[in-house]
Each structure stands twice: as C-alpha cells, then as structure tokens.
Amino acid sequence: MVKSTLFGLALLLALGCSSGGEQPQPGAAAEHSEGPLATLYGQEATMSPEIAALAIENAHQVSPELLTGGQLTREQMAQLQQLGYRTFINLRMADEEGTGWEEEYAKSAGIVFHRLPIPGAKGITRANAEQLAGLLEQAGDEPVAIYCASGNRVGALLAMKAHYIDDLNVEEAVAYGVKAGMTRLEPVVRGRLSVE
C-alpha cells in the first residue's frame, strides 16, 4: 500500500474518532468511509512515552508512522533513529538558523534525509504537496519524521496533501493540518484549497 494511501487512511479514522459519534460530513471522508482509507484514518494517534521523552518542540504523533514537529537536534534525530525512524524530511531552508547540518549527519548515521525547502506561505502549494507525497511514498511503511521550525509549515503542507492527493474535502484537510501542527498558516491553506 502506498504511503499516500496510508496517510489518507489515518486521517479518515482520526477524524471519525474525534467527532464524538456524529455522522461524517459529506465529502471525501464519507466517500472513503467504507473503503481502505477508513482503517488507518480511524486510529487515534497518541504520543508514545519514548517520543514524548525526547521533548521535540510542538511534536505531534499524527499516526503510528508519522511524527511531525519543530526543528530536531542531532541528539533527537539519533534517538528517533533508535526508535525505528529512518526517514527524515525537513521543510526548512538550509540557511535558516539551527538547520543545515542534517545532510552531512545523515551520511554518517545511515539514515535517509530529504530537504524540501518551503519558504513560508508562498511555498504552501499543490506542487510542493505532491513532492512531499512522493517522498512519503518512497519511505513505504516505515516511520517518518517531518519537521520545520515549529511544525506550522509541516501541518500546512500535509493539509494540502490531504486534499489534493488523498481527496479529503477542505474542512477535513484543514483539520488534519491542525492536528499535524498547522497554526498561523491555516488562513493561507483555506484560501488556496477553496480556489479550485
């Protein structure tokens, strides 16, 4: 099963668990509620004690195989590797403070590192969401950590992916983005998803 489908499943189930038993709203989630997307999206993601102990800024364990948050340190990345994380995706520009070291570190640590530079709001695009989906698909079923400075860009780009790749409606995609760390970029995402 490709990674984008897995994340699509995780969102539908998570939204279903948090709705308090209400009927699903019309849209993509309802369309997929009986299909394979329903099984993964219904899992309620909870932070494992091991990951919580790492004190990653604004960490969100969105699903069992997807961790989002702010900038990782070398120590946090090494500890995540011990917990089974082999793929790391950074949405920060290489010249932002606190980053730029990961490429060299990845070579010596034997992990997969991708930098998908998202320069703030102007980088929250469908094209970048498609690139992110491709990177996630490459990881297969293995755990992935995606991060930026605070998790805001991560959540925003995942919301775009949820809508354009996983076929969730705007409200469902935004809810997923918030769950993954989106804050100040929510109006940008709403604006872009509403213009189709």
Image (spheres, rainbow, N blue to C red):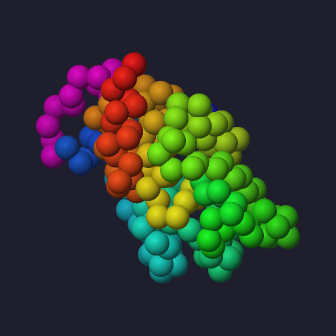
Residue 85, horizontal then vertical, whole percent? 64, 62
Q: Nearer the viewer, residue 107 or 1?
A: 107
From this view, report whether residue 20 is shown above or below residue 191.
below
Asked whether, in this view, residue 42 is left or right of residue 135, the answer is left
Q: Position of residue 181 (x, y in %)?
A: 40, 56
Residue at figure coordinates x 35%, y 54% from the top left? 184
Q: Would residue 6 be visible to someone looking at this image?
A: no
Left-right relation of 168 to 23:
right
Q: Nearer the viewer, residue 27 or 96?
A: 96
Q: Give the answer, above or below, for where 113 lies relative to 35.
A: below
Which quadrant of the view contains residue 61?
Answer: bottom left
Residue placed at 68% from the left, 76% from the top? 74
Part of the protein shown in magenta: 20-37
Secondary structure of the magenta portion, mostly? loop
Q: Is residue 51 left or right of residue 98?
A: left
Q: Nearer the viewer, residue 16 or 132?
A: 132
Q: Quadrant of residue 109?
A: bottom right
State which quadrant residue 102 falls in. Answer: bottom right
Q: Nearer the viewer, residue 124 or 81?
A: 124
Quadrant containing the N terminus in the rendered view: top right
- Is 136 covered by the magenta stretch? no
In the image, taking residue 141 as reference, residue 20 lies left or right, namely left
> Residue at left 19%, top 44%?
19
Q: Residue at image x 44%, y 50%?
A: 155
Q: Is residue 67 above or below residue 15?
A: below
- Location of the C terminus (image quadrant): top left
In the rendered view, tell whether residue 79 sits above or below residue 159.
below
